[in-house]
Amino acid sequence: MKNITVLGATGSIGDSTLSVVALHPDKFNIFALSAHTNWQKMQTLCEKFQPKFVVMTDESAAEALSKVVSNNTEVLHGAEALNTIAAHDKTDYVMAAIVGSAGMASSLAGAKAGKRIMLASKESLVLAGDLFMQTVRDNNAELIPVDSEHSAIFQCLQSGKSGLSKIQLTASGGPFLYTPQKKLCAVTPDEACAHPNWSMGQKISTDSATMMNKGLEVIEAHYLFGLPAEKIDVVVHPQSIVHSSVYYADGSTLSQLGNPDMRSVISYALSYPNRIASGVEPLDLTNNPPLEFYAPDLDKFACLRQAFDALKQGGNAMGTLNAANEVAVEHFLNNKISFLDITKVIQHTLDTVQHTDISSLEAIIANDTTARETARAIIKKYA
Ligand SMILES: NC(=O)c1ccc[n+]([C@@H]2O[C@H](COP(=O)([O-])OP(=O)(O)OC[C@H]3O[C@@H](n4cnc5c(N)ncnc54)[C@H](OP(=O)(O)O)[C@@H]3O)[C@@H](O)[C@H]2O)c1
């Protein structure tokens, strides 16, 4: 029996994780859960899973929840408490699914404590990739990707990297793949969040619409698989059936396929190196539309190019890119800037924040703060 701690339990990845766990009560026990403000949904989760600990990072949400949960569940609050449950002696596996940079410290705390980290929160690697990977190695933690593309590559690379020539991440192209570039200035948050294949939280949905999500995934892949930008390729595949591919020197290509449902990825992370049922329907290749593949348009989806450039630049550029993107997406979702302003805010922030090499957690956090302040100041000029 493995004790699972789910960070970001009330989100889309949290939902999928809990639904896979519920299929296997003989294998997994929910030990701890976290959320930010949504105490009402957490109350329902507590009734169903009876965790030992719950963390609400928002204090008033924790107060409201503690009045309604049973005495068997201890309610904690604050960001520090996330580290406590991630690193707790009784936690075996940590699902790191807090959206944005808010998930970084707790993912790191779990890695430091030598846990199996099932990493959905790609921003942790984008911000602190070198430090994160070093912490995983130093503490014999296990790092299992929970992104469909990286899980696909992780699965394809099970026999090693010998003869590997490149990896190729597939991208659905998001809701605006076929929208003419000149019409993008008027698209709304609702339209940006209406992903054709995947059901996800608002931030990652917007990132998919700008293709920044793919850009963050390129950086994530660089750290997870130890490959330079030149060996990481992106192909647009609107059906989201081929989740990613690995190319070898002998002309062979290995791909992983499946219906677009994160429960497959999550069940693999939970059961690795074995496989268990996830509740996902098997693929029916005879009953699918034709599979299409295109090169991405880096002018229309400039965020993808910006992410490649930041990776090549190294140092603080990736953290600056991530911070500017989080601020810009938040303002777009609140109707404060237009969809096309997102890429402009990111570029302006990258051009303004001084480029440095950083390695310590303190420097990473300081750069994140500076980049956010810079992005906000830039947005004020747009308003
Ligand atoms: N959704 C997918 O299919 C998918 C696929 C691959 C990777 N990912 C990655 O997985 C992560 C989660 O995505 P999601 O779609 O599940 O997001 P989501 O639905 O927006 O859920 C986010 C979760 O994080 C919590 N949270 C938000 N802000 C927080 C803060 N400041 N401090 C602590 N907790 C906070 C939320 O709590 P409240 O509910 O209380 O706000 C919620 O539990 C992201 O990094 C995303 O890129 C997602």
Image: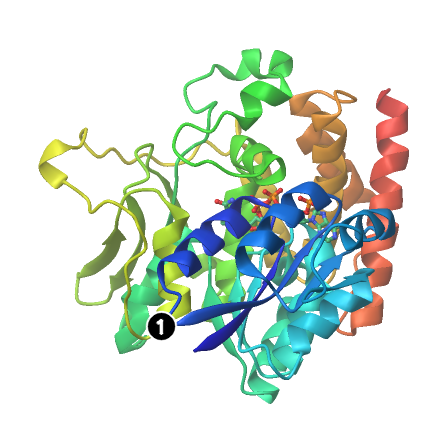
Q: Residue 213: x, y in percent? A: 54, 43
**Residue shown at 21% from the left, 35% from the top:** 291
- Give the residue at x 32% y 34%: 294
Name the residue: 21% across, 58% down: 253
User: Mark 1 = which residue?
Assistant: 272
360 and 228: which is toward the camera: 360
Considering every residue shown, the one lying at the far front of the view is 71
Q: Position of residue 280 (x, y in %)?
A: 29, 47
Indicate the quadrant where residue 97 lies.
bottom right
Quarter of the image for the C terminus: give it: top right
Amino acid found under the numbered disc labelled 1: Tyr
Q: Can residue 317 be spotted in the picture? A: no
Crowding at label 1, few (<14), some or many (≥20) Cα neighbours within 10 Å? few
Image coordinates of residue 14 in percent, x first then y, are 54, 51
Q: How many marks?
A: 1
Rendered image quadrant of residue 268: bottom left
Residue 87 relative to residue 29: left or right: right
Looking at the rendered image, the quarter that the N terminus falls into is bottom left
* Residue for point 54% across, 46% down: 215
* Residue at the far left in the pictured view: 286
Residue 162, compared with residue 366, is above or below; it is below
Left or right, 281 with reference to 320: left
Question: Is disc 1's CB within 8 Å of ligand 1?
Answer: no
